[in-house]
Amino acid sequence: MNRTGKTLLLIGATSDIGRATGLVYAMAGWDLQLAGRNLEAVRREADDIGTRSGASVSVHHLDILDTSRFEDFCGALPTLPDTVVCVVGQLGEQQRAERELDHATQVLRTNFEGPALLLGLIAERFAKRGSGTIIGISSVAGDRGRGSNYVYGAAKAGLSAFLSGLRNRLASAGVRVLTVKPGFVRTRMTAAMKLPPLLTAEPGQVADAIFSASEMKKQREVIYVRGLWWPIMLAIRSIPEPIFKRLRL
Amino acid sequence: MSLQGWGRYRNYDSEVLECLLPRSVRTMVSSGAGLIARGNGRSYGDAAVGEITTLMCGGLSRMKAFDPGTGILTVEGGTLLSDILQAFIPRGYFPPVVPGTKFVTVGGMIAADVHGKNHHQVGGFGDHVTQLKLVVASGELVTCSRTENPELFLATIGGMGLTGVIVEASFKMRPIETGWILQKTTVAQDLGGALKVLQATDELTYSVAWIDCLATGKSMGRSLIFTGEHATREQVTSRMPQAKFFPATMEPKLSLPFDFPAWILNRASVSAFNEMYFRAGARKAGPPSLVHWNPYFFPLDGIHRWNRLYGKRGFLQHQCVVPEGNALAVLGEMLERFVRSGKGSFLAVLKKLGRGGGLISFPTSGYTLALDLPATADVFPLLEEIDKIVVHAGGRLYLAKDARQSRQTFEAGYPQLSAFKELRRVTGADRRFRSHLSTRLGI
């Protein structure tokens, strides 16, 4: 298999979307840096991806809530990657987040603060080099706050806004910034939910959409993995607030 | 939850536990009883349904390491063969043995000691396993090989999951120059002819016969024998200069979206199919031609969920092996019964097997005949009659296909059964690991 000499940094490598994304890049000839909180689990994925693809894969410890370690983390990477994908996320429980400040804090920090600060830090290094692609996994839940999951949604809205700003600022510096909104994905995170088939993607489809938007069709920068989500969210965003607030969504 | 085998002829009740990490298997085993590991659910009968609990091992799907020097690949037990093919064919390696479908796990291939079209040359999959990691009845993780815990190793190969849960395995891949198979089709006009061709093609890597088990009289047992070799680069270049050495995997395009009505498969329709298939094959007979590895090894994988072909009632697969000595007479007698009953199927396969591997592995020197039959009431007594012929000839049935054989048939066919049972008793596996199959057959 042809190796490209390019490197992907994957943050949140043990999630289903992370694993699938790592495999797609490795099979396309990229080398990988996998980061995650549980080093044993990260190593399991690294061995798997390395064995399947022949890619060289390094493992790195990273806790997305431990922002004070981010500088050291970036400094310790063997090389500055060509592309970074952050798939870290936590759905949390909305009702618990309404009652427990700790839980709400964790959902906000895991989905917004951690990913935004880390990608921001890497963006500085990419800007200095004059190249790089930054890919954040946000969510359709961030397109408009809804009563059933607005804590998670607010964090994702924050991430979407952060990525949008970053894209705007770095467009002329040779750095691309992509926002990916997977919609429903069949993963461990959603294993207990009943999901509508037309709006639900497999982890492999999310991975293909990420790779394709980043490496092949380079015109789009905000990606809905299942296209049907775009008109749906457009409609949801266009409902006037006096009506919207009475809906149970 | 209700589980089925691939033949779908019966529902079995079993509680289901998902294994996501190799280490979680240890806790599940030590806190459970009456359990069995299930891979991708491709055994036909009740082998992969726990008497009380079924451990779903599809999540143990990570590859661990590959050494290009020795060709040894190490993977978790739930790794799919299709994943291995996808990752390694483009790099010039092929599994030592593949069964008739690629949608099986490595753990399942070892537990059934699956055989391929090359069994007469290289033995079963188990013969190429260099090491296993097994969670045994105590919940301990035990490493075993031909030199380390060899009794446990040989009982686990072909042991239908009844010694423990295979969480990791190492086996030797073989180098290939291309992803093409140089296939040759030979026509045999009757059973004797088919056995002669299989005998004569002993030197070739792959050989298998499709047998028309509805043909009567002089044509009884008429067959197409497909032999094959991994094609070299030179053979590919000289025949198809434009072809890629490693063609992309073609995925199933056809799918059976629903159960076929039962009347579609009847004597007339199957007979017509067989006639057509035989003639088409006979036209292709002659000089060898190049075939993509996927349709060559896994023709049925091209039809997603083909097990719905037999409708809601499901189907039974009968696969036996009989010793070489009087194979012609024995297989002839069996074919005659099938022909007379009109129950013959269009998926009948005849193949020569070599020596066996594990303690209760199915393969043993002789000829194996496999065919599908709808699970209708009149098929059961017919198969009882066939089993008598098998037992009388000193043969046995394949446990991975079985859903219905009697204890007597089973016990007669597996002479090392008592040693296997003793090992189960000593290790405590007899209480911990029990499938519907092991209970039915008293293993």
Image (cartoon, helix red, strand yellow):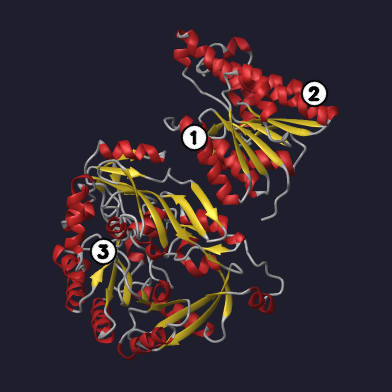
- N-term mark: 2 or 1: 1
Q: Is residue B389 visible?
A: yes
**Viewer-side residue, B376 vs B7:** B7
As measured in the structure, the alpha-carbon distance from the residue carrying label 1 to the one carrying label 3 is 37 Å
* SS type, badge 1: helix
Residue topped by disc 2: A168
Q: Could you say which disc has been placed on residue B360 in the image?
A: 3
- Say which chain tag 2 marks: A
User: Badge 2: how crowded within 10 Å, few (<14), some, or many (20+)?
Assistant: few
User: What residue is at 64 percent from the left and 14 percent from the top?
Assistant: A240
Residue A63 image offset from top left, x and y in percent = 56, 23
User: What residue is at 24 percent from the left and 76 percent from the top?
Assistant: B341
Q: Is residue A165 above or below residue B396?
A: above
**Which mark's residue is nearer the viewer, 2 or 1?**
1
Q: Are marks 1 and 3 on the same chain?
A: no
Q: Is residue A143 visible?
A: no
What is the quadrant of the N terminus of chain B in the image?
Answer: top left
Q: Name the residue type under label 1.
A: Glu
As measured in the structure, the alpha-carbon distance from the residue carrying label 2 to the one carrying label 1 is 38 Å
Whether residue B312 sits left or right of residue B378 in the image: it is right
Residue A247 image offset from top left, x and y in percent = 53, 15
Residue topped by disc 1: A40
